[in-house]
Image: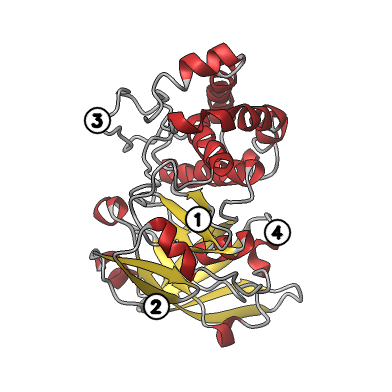
Amino acid sequence: MIRTMRVGGALLLLVGASLAQAQDTVKKPKKLPAPPMFASETPLVLTLTTNIKQIKKDKTADAPWRAATIAYRGDDGKTVTVPVRVRTRGVWRLKHCDYPPIRIKVADKAGKGTLLQALDEPKLVTHCRNLDSYEQYVLQEAQLYRINRLVTDVSHKVRVLRVSYADSASGKVEATRYSLLVEDPAHVARRAGGVILERQGATADDLDPETSALAFTFQYLIGNTDFSFSGLHNGEIIALADGRNLPVAYDFDFAGAIDATYAGVDPSLTVRRVRDRQFRGYCSQQAAYPKAIAHFVAQKEAIYHLYRDPIGQLLPPNKVKSTLGYYDEFYASIKTPKDVQRNLFETCVK
């Protein structure tokens, strides 16, 4: 059996290795400068220029990198233009989106001295379709990433962008929409002091209980069931040199908190609607949850405040009201230990 593990930019082959044995190859990564892009949460206005027509046709998993530029106004008022490369990514969105999500590759030399310095290969979450409703889904997902940052450091930093998508062939701007830049997984791993482990099959025994409790409680808060840390579906695992493995959540557009028109529920689950919650944490890690639950209770006001700050104000008032009402239901469901037992651990994974 061949397993793989990515350390920094290198992909290591682990022949017949268990998750525990894979830890032997993990060394604490070198600290790198933090990307300046994520030093602020203020939405950044920029222009992405590439062959839009070609990008829309790149629907395969092995689509090539395409030439592009990103331009924004610097602090001195002058335009900063950075050459980059872009390629389409994703599975569901590649099939269903007019504007597919992309990954951006920024060369060290090209990005030096700009807001794109040290970004490596972040994801850009696009509006999928050139409609106001789909743009709102992006902003709602940005809020979920921001909540995850509040409750755990083992999470992706994000930056809301106001992107004008310009076609390099015609020179015309095809759309100007809010988009979301999501930090490269390797940067999340470096902050935690580990590396991204590209190894499926993690069990409860493999994952750090405290980090897992935060991750699964967060997914329950937002009503997301579209993930699997074991299967590395919308989830990553960071391997630390001390033997711990930390789950990291990402991609939340199927969450009940967003309630996107295209979102669905896996028929193998007990819930039938996106807005219905189902706890998917491990029964064997139950002892870690009182601390996690207390942490979410302590962060309640900070979470709700995200919907009153400048980014939260980009959402319609009625959507803010319904989202906070959805979170109220979460907090009611964890009000007492008896509530937690009934609402969470009756459906835990054995």
**Who comes first in sequence, dot 3 or dot 1?**
1
Given residues 185 and 12, the one toward you in this image is: 12
Residue topped by disc 4: 40
- Report the Cα–Cα distance between label 3 and label 1: 32 Å
**Who comes first in sequence, dot 4 or dot 1?**
4
- Report the Cα–Cα distance between label 4 and label 1: 15 Å
The disc at residue 168 is 2
What crowding class fits label 1: few (fewer than 14 Cα within 10 Å), some (14-19), or many (20 or more)? many
Task: Say which amino acid is labelled 3.
Answer: Ser
Looking at the picture, how far across and down is residue 150, in whole percent? 66, 43
- Report the Cα–Cα distance between label 4 and label 3: 41 Å
**Residue at left offset 69%, top offset 44%:** 310
What crowding class fits label 2: few (fewer than 14 Cα within 10 Å), some (14-19), or many (20 or more)? some
The disc at residue 179 is 1
**SS label for mark 1:** strand
- Is 301 left or right of 80, judged from the image as shown? right
**Who comes first in sequence, dot 1 or dot 2?**
2
Vertical arrangement, residue 163 with respect to residue 323, above or below: below
Vertical arrangement, residue 6 with respect to residue 202, above or below: below
**Who comes first in sequence, dot 4 or dot 3?**
4
Task: Say which amino acid is labelled 1.
Answer: Ser
- Report the Cα–Cα distance between label 3 and label 2: 45 Å
Residue topped by disc 3: 268
- Is 131 left or right of 54, judged from the image as shown? right
What crowding class fits label 4: few (fewer than 14 Cα within 10 Å), some (14-19), or many (20 or more)? few
Q: Marks 1 and 4: in contact by CB < 8 Å?
A: no
Task: Say which amino acid is labelled 2.
Answer: Ser
Looking at the picture, how far across and down is residue 130, in whole percent? 38, 51
**SS label for mark 2:** loop
Task: Say which amino acid is labelled 4.
Answer: Ser
**SS label for mark 4:** loop
